[in-house]
Amino acid sequence: MSQGQPPQPIAIHRYTSRSNLHVVPQKQLATVLELLPPGSFVTLENQPNDLPPFQLIQCKGGRCWVRQQAWGQHVHWEVEHRRLKSA
């Protein structure tokens, strides 16, 4: 570039053609699950209002074990994590 001449514009098209951005189909997006600590109370999707919340025992591999307090210590139910939300 010589003195007195304006700088040349940058050719933007040469950068955009090699973009690292890609469109990801909706079905490939990950679902973010709510963090549910053991001992917390949770409800199921579509849970009736007259049914009390469940107590969460543990979650592992997309599955959670829940119980009702009235069921006793050794009775539990296995539910998909995505079906639960904190009460």
Image (tube, rainbow, N blue to C red):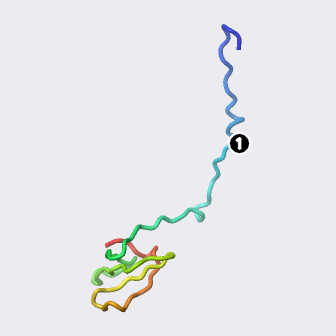
Residue, x 38% and y 88% (percent of image)? 76
Q: Residue furthest top?
A: 4
Residue, x 51% and y 65% (percent of image)? 31
Q: Quarter-wise, where is residue 53 in the image?
A: bottom left
Image quadrant in which the C terminus is located: bottom left
| Side of 54 where 10 appears, left or right | right
Residue, x 68% and y 20% (percent of image)? 8
| Side of 45 where 7 appears, left or right | right
Image quadrant in which the N terminus is located: top right
Instruction: Report x, y in % for residue 15.
Output: 68, 37
Eyeballing the image, is 35 above or below 53?
Answer: above
Eyeballing the image, is 7 above or below 17?
Answer: above
Label count reads 1
Q: Quarter-wise, where is residue 37 in the image?
A: bottom left
Observer-nearest residue: 11 or 79?
Answer: 79
| Side of 29 where 36 appears, left or right | left
Instruction: Report x, y in % for residue 11.
Output: 70, 29
Give the class, few, some or many, for how many residues have Cα within 10 Å of label 1's Cα (few <14, many ≥20): few
Residue type at numbered disc 1: Arg
Helix, strand or loop at label 1? It is loop
Instruction: Report x, y in % for residue 38.
Output: 36, 75
Observer-nearest residue: 79 or 36?
Answer: 36
Instruction: Report x, y in % for residue 29.
Output: 56, 62
Residue, x 29% and y 80% (percent of image)? 49
Q: Which residue is mark 1?
A: 18
